[in-house]
Image (cartoon, grey):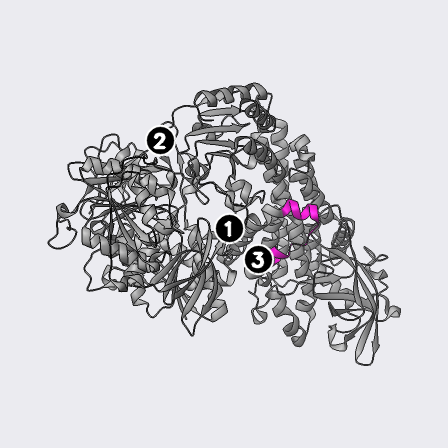
Amino acid sequence: MGIIIQKDLCTGCGACTSQCPIGAIKVVNNQALIDETCILCQACLSVCPTEAILLQEEKKLRPATEGVTESIYEGVWIFGEQRHGVISDVVYELLGEGRKLADKLGTHLWVIVLGSEMRSEAEKLLHYGADLVCLVDHPDLSHFHDDSYTGVLSYLIEKYKPEIVLSGATAIGRSFIPRVAVRVKTGLTADCTALDIDPDQRLLLQTRPAFGGNVMATITSPFHRPQMATVRHKVMKKAVYSDAPKGTIRLETVPENLLSSRTDVISLVKDLIEQVNLADADIIIAGGRGLGGPQNFQLLQDLAHTLGAAVAASRAAVDAGWIPYSHQVGQTGKTVCPKLYIACGISGAIQHLVGMQSSNTIVAINKDPEAPIFSVADYGLVGNLFEILPSLTKKFKEAL
Amino acid sequence: MNIIVCIKQVPETGNVKIDPETHTLIRSGVPSIINPMDTYAIEEALRWKEKLGASTTVLTMGPPQAHDALREAISMGIDQAIVLSDQKFAGSDTYVTAYTLALAVRKLAPYDLIFCGKQAIDGDTAQVGPGLAEHLGIAHIAYVKKIEEIDQERAVLRAQRLMEDGYEVVDIRLPALLTVVKEINEPRFPSLKGKMRARKCEIPVWRAEDLGGEEMMGFGLSASPTRVKAIFAPPGRGKGEIFNGEASVMAQELVERLRAQKVI
Amino acid sequence: MYYFLTEEQTEIQSLARRIAKEKVLPIRAELDEKEEFPWQIMKSLAEADLFSIYLPEEYGGMDGGCFELCLAIEELSRICGGVAVCYAASALGSFPILLFGNGQQKQKYLPEIAQGKKLSAFALTEANAGSDAGGILTTARVVGNEYVLNGTKQWITNGGEAEIYTVIAMTDKAKGSRGASAFIVEKGTPGFEFGKKEKKMGIRSSATRELVFTDCRIPKENLLGREGTGFMIAMRTLDTSRPGIGAQAIGIAQGALDEALDYARERVQFERPISSFQVIQHMLADMATQVEAARALTYTAARFIDSGAKDVSKISAMAKVFASDVAMHVTTQAVQILGGYGYMRDYPVEKMMRDAKITQIYEGTNQIQRNVIALQLIKEKARGK
């Protein structure tokens, strides 16, 4: 198994050498050569203008499990995460997406809920397009534990054999879903930004950013079921409410031993520092190095107050100590996807863009017309932000 | 007490830029570094080594250059390092990576604690940590922002797990795996004496056959459940509208545009 | 320019550079503004083993010498001359013990200095005795098993922050230049207090204080060497530390040159970057040449000292006087190149200019250095060299 370059098609143009993230390709005598450090990431394949680069697979491919073929797996599942007895917002977004996938496959859409006294929340889910809510209701499941949730979800997967399982990429999802994938011996793709179906092979096409968002990759699990994927909050659109739900609720019981865990939750401490709810904000105003100092965040606060927006920052501002880390947006901070993102005095380094480039509308304010932020901005204001921000605040106040 | 830290050597994606014309990567000699989140894992292991007198091992799966990352870890104070390197491992997805690491960890048994960074900056899936715990059959806590205490006698560890709305205090039975976040500590610089030791240190290379195992799951791309179907440039957002000139005029125009688009 | 560093020397240089860039750079303006002692950075340097590089292995050191110390000082100075001097002055304070201490004294004090657990400081200068060091008035009388110190030292770097002080005091006024002795005094000894922290033009994160001795009793064992060798110890100490000041000056100059070069390439006037104007090019060329010459001279002096040579005063003085004059000139030129921006506290070069000035003054003013060089030249000629 490896990546080969067909000599007769290779023109030695070198497009692949710059694409390779680890520098494994060199052009020698007008031919590109891949050395043994190749990590098979396949980034070079798509960039070759003559399609000279191929992934050579071994003919023998392993099936999922002995004697089991993919065709007996059916159904799209969504893990119905709950916190403190309330279904998380991301589940409603997954329902929206899950409905599309289930329809394309001509199959059912289930939500799996683990918790205690979750009946009324389960009924709510029926209004958002679920065909069935599989509810495991037990006091031991009211609080999240990796062991019990992994055990119960894996048990249900083995029992019902869904072909697709989706979950929110939340603190809970990112913790236990990878365990589930290993336990049921299947593939998992994290933080998908797009999902689609290839109907011929009933394949889930899972698209996500890679290399810090510099490229997009579409991933599949061709031979393993279920196909599992996690999706971040606010990436997909919420499902539509229906007055006439058609689904049902099924109460499941599971073996007692699955309900115990090797962990104990002693206490929960809510965020005592100012709740920075960037994830839910519809409008975010972010400040960067161009602000020049902590006192200038006041200008952002004024604008944010007028718009009912949250205040965020680039890493430069956080590292300089102008604003706490909880406000940081970017590769090492939070990823956000608001309706409107206004970047002030932020140059737009790739590490920042990765955290906000999927915002619906991006406005950039910077005195440097060459700043990279303008390449992703829908509206760019070139000028002095110390004049522009107060102006904007004033104009918004008048307009609203 | 025996502590293992799993780290990854990654390309420094910060230096990777996109050519705005062709939407392809411009890689200007991207250096390899220890995945930044893993330095917090290394530091945490060192702190508990100092507090409890533990012995520490750092483990990585990667190409031969991965030695550099391991030597950096040793120069910070880690006792020994092992690299898992074999052409057969190439193309491993997170499932197989976790499996391969698990085989290596089992060879290092007995162990009490495994530290991993929250996620790697190149793949950033955050899946290997929990997956590794599952392969090993041990419990884990993800996103640990602080370890409150370790009770060696009762083999219990108490940690703070970061959640969206705050944090939970969780007790976990050892042996266990923890993935750690930035908030947990401030990694130290390597010391000169550490660097000297790192230079002289022997780092064994374990190949596929060294990991053995009756489990014939296999390694690398051919054993990975997930496959890359396509790689493409992220869709451009299209050219935006640029305004110049007087601040109040620009502000007015922007507000009007946003209103027209129903953004506000 | 490649100076043929060994692998270990390169490690020292790159580690110091890294700490300077990651830890010092973000806070240097604040340290200067608030005149705060950089304890956090001293801690990072200690953990990285940088305090041990010039000390012998038997005391926890790495068997390096003056040259290794210069490499580290230069890297720190490039980012902040103030932080660098806290580090360099601690080495200075330890030299009397290193060069003239007996086995017990070295064993007692050097390990903790190597680990960076305690800082040290050197105390010679007094209100009436700067260049004229012979005019010191601090006395040390023998009383039973102790020495009793009385007097005031002025402008002592690391004063109040260091734990270990090497102090020069008069034991026998009648013997003139043979009448002083060197002592080790620990912070917290009764009768040893500190004056207020001085407000300085530059190196403001460094702590400069008076040391006040009022019937301060120290054990007899704290005498370094023999009575009467105080000035000789002081001179040898300063000879050894002078290349370090040269390194500090070069570092500051290099930092200023780097800033000026970056600025000249970005600043556009008359539709061109100012780096395209010949006048700026010549300024930069001269600055760079001077820094390189100062570096080569300082490294030579340091290596010469490390080779165990005896007659180091002349080359050591040359390195200090040349490098410090270069630093003053280069930093002033850097401010000039940055123009109005160079004068603003928001930009780092005005601080570099303020920091550079002291290198022409302390550890022997440049005028005294010239005296030393000239006298040495004449002596050598007289001997028929």
Label 2 close to label 3 by CB (< 8 Å): no
Measured as percent of width and height from the top left, residue C74 is found at 61, 50
Query: Subunit of mark 2?
Result: B
Give the numbered dot on residue A271: 1
Tag nearer the camera, 1 or 2:
1
Q: Horizontally, is C367 left or right of C68 in the view?
A: right
Amino acid type at mark 3: Ser
Q: CA distance from mark 1 to mark 2?
A: 40 Å
Task: State yes or no: residue C39 in magenta.
Answer: yes
Measured as percent of width and height from the top left, residue C110 is found at 63, 69
Amino acid type at mark 1: Asp
Label 1 close to label 2 by CB (< 8 Å): no
- Whether residue A220 appears in this view of the structure is yes
As helix, strand or loop, the secondary structure at mark 3 comes to helix
Judging by the rendered image, the residue that carries numbered circle 2 is B23
Q: Horizontally, is A315 left or right of B142 in the view?
A: right
Mark 1 vs mark 3: same chain? no
Measured as percent of width and height from the top left, residue B220 is found at 24, 52
Residue in front for this viewpoint, B162 or A91:
A91
Task: State yes or no: residue B28 in magenta.
Answer: no
Query: Subunit of mark 3?
Result: C
Q: Residue at x 29, y 59 (%)?
A: B134
Q: CA distance from mark 1 to mark 3?
A: 31 Å
Tag nearer the camera, 1 or 3:
1
Judging by the rendered image, the residue that carries numbered circle 3 is C44
As helix, strand or loop, the secondary structure at mark 2 comes to loop
Q: Residues within 10 Å of mark 1 (few under 14, many from 20)?
A: some
Query: Subunit of mark 1?
Result: A
User: Which span is picked out in magenta?
Assistant: C28-44
Amino acid type at mark 2: His
Q: Residue at x 20, y 35 (%)?
A: A104
Q: Is residue B66 above or below residue A353?
A: below
